[in-house]
Amino acid sequence: VSQATASPGRIAGPDLRRLVRALVPFLSLIVILGAIFWIQPRSMSAFGLDLLLRLVVPLAFATLAQLCVMTVNDLDLSIGMFIGVTSGISATLLVQQPVLGVLALAGCVVVYGALGALIHLRNLPSIVVTLGMSFVWLGVAITLLPSPGGEAPQWLRSFMSMKLDIPSPIIMLVVIALVAHIGLMWSPYGAVLRGVGGNSRAVRRAGWSLLKAKVTMYTLAGLCGVLAGMTLLGLSGAADARAGDRYTLLSIAAVILGGGEFVGGRVSPIGAVVGATTIWLAANSLLSVLKLPPEWQIGAIGVILIAVLALRWLVGRLGRAS
Amino acid sequence: MSSLALGLRRILAKPWVWAYIAAAGAWLATVVFTSGQAGPGLATAALKFASFSTLVAIGQMFVITLGPGNIDLSIPSTMVLAGTVAIRVMDGDPNVIPIGLVLTILVGLAVGTFNFSLIRLLSIPPIIATLSSQFIILSLAIVLNRGLRIKPPDILGDFPGSLVPVLGFPVLAILVIALAIVMHVVLHRTVYGRSVTAIGQSERAAHLAGLRVQRVRFTAYLASAVLAATAGLLLASFSGGTALDMGDPYLLTSIAVVVIGGTSVAGGEGNVPGLWGAALFLFLLSAMLDTFGVGEGVKQIMTGLIVILVIVVASFRKAPAS
């Protein structure tokens, strides 16, 4: 550290490091996509990409939900179970009684916002509250759908299987990433929201309500959770109470892979969507085109996670040394 | 009279008392509901099953007490790997039991070392490090397990369920209670335990005070993994072989037990007696809801709401002091 302060690149250093750091998620994605294309050249077509990236859309929403919560230095261990609930509601109530279905989904989002308020007002550890909520959501999902079933609304299914010149998942992912990026990184209030994670005291002194910020972020997380559940349902056609299970840990990993940090309000929505794509491709497509035995596939996710984080650590070190 | 009231108030002010009161309440409610039939049998079952969760929770408690961000998500997969390796090597032969026990400990030490080297060498946040390693450990377990359910040697298989002859008290519970007492003394009366608490309160202050911060952290992660491995072997023996999903419930349980037991999630304040109370409570709560005949969904919802309720109540209890 002392060397860095003495070096002439002192002003340019942090900017360069930030840039390189921001490039790591893209680099990881390119490597993984390249590997898939190399082994399976046929996937390098509109149809192939459509298949590859389809299921990334729900994970991207789940990751953005996690990112909202992580921006204010919290962690959401319930998002996966919540997705089980929202896809369950969309497969049952939303089809049978659309008005009631919309109200139920809105109610879920309100509950999320209320959790943000509770966590802020009582200064509770988010890990524990959301851990408790993961039981609650699972219970709700099981009650709603004791066995996998229900049916995706027709409009949702046709929306998710839309055929365009450019594969529709790519358009969706780009739009999702841009909207989130503009909202959180460019808008003035987005800066305030990130500031809550960075230095909440300063934000409060400047006259902003911390309560409002936390409720906003949790509400947005709930909204992303609803969208994740709906898109997942649109792709799978039927709902399963436990369908979202793996999204909790994958979403945390995706935010981190995308350059986000647990504290400090340092997040990157575009990076997170790229991270979600990377981890999904790594965990599913790459491992199956590599013809890896299924028992090693789970382990390979761990190896890839560690490899990307090691790369980031290396970049951080090189940046500091230069 | 007043000294009695004062004494009572002092006891009630202990964070762990409530877990025991709640456990007793759940037990009583079940006994009343079954008109006294379930009493002794239920207590014995609760002690047996709570032994497993307390065992893993002791390790999780040490890790969580290290301070914000410290958590061990690899507990379930460590349990499965240790159970798989040990039971497979023993292959039902009672003479090989010592080797199986040694291997269990070695698995724990290896996992703990791997986890901490990720945390330390690559500066990966513990939650992501143990999340990644968890995938790798589980993969190893799946490869070694091959879906075969090998029976444990009879002596080992009978051990976790055995009772002390006259008293009818589970032997395993006695051992885990003894371990809890030792760990309580370690946490509060030894330099090591005080170091864990000090690091949890302020890592920087602990470092400046000359504590070997990283060495203490390392041993906490080692302890967590070794205890998880031991619990895995015991659970596998108890259930007649290793099941790949046998560890799954213990991730949330270990965290919930630590939190309900009065340990601060922000670190710096561990609590051992509460672990037993909380483990008993969680088992008895689920037993109570079972006898009431509620569905699986309602059971999950109630469990989640109670975890949240406990943390909210705890926040009110702490409030006047600050």
Image (tube, grey):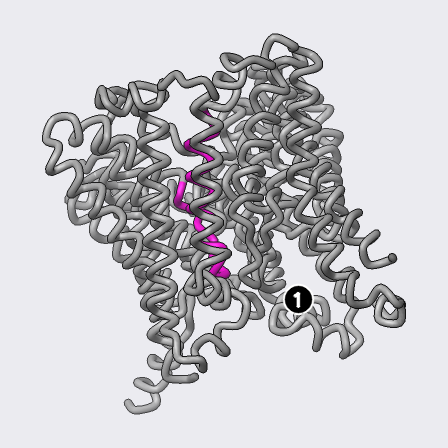
Characterize the local packing of mark 1: few (<14), some (14-19) or many (20 or more) Cα atoms within 10 angstroms.
many
- Choose between A67 and B195: the one closer to the eye: A67
In the rendered structure, the answer to whether residue B19 lies left or right of residue B128 reads left
Q: Residue furthest bottom?
A: B2
Residue B30: horizontal and vertical position, in percent? 22, 46
Residue A177: horizontal and vertical position, in percent? 48, 41
In the rendered structure, the answer to whether residue B311 lies left or right of residue B53 reads left
Residue A198: horizontal and vertical position, in percent? 55, 67
* Residue at 75% across, 55% down: A16
Which residues, given as a range, are shown in magenta? A55-79
Quadrant where the N terminus of chain A is found in the figure = bottom right
* Residue at 60% across, 52% down: B59
* Residue at 31% across, 31% down: A230
Q: Quadrant of residue B218?
A: bottom right
Q: Is residue A74 magenta?
A: yes
Q: Quadrant of residue B12?
A: bottom left
Residue A193 higher or lower than B201, as above or below? above
Q: Does the rendering let one see residue B139?
A: yes
Circle 1 residue? B196
Residue B251: horizontal and vertical position, in percent? 50, 43
Q: Does the rendering let one see residue B258?
A: no
Amino acid at dot 1: Val
* Residue at 30% across, 91% down: B2
In the rendered structure, the answer to whether residue B242 lies left or right of residue B293 reads right
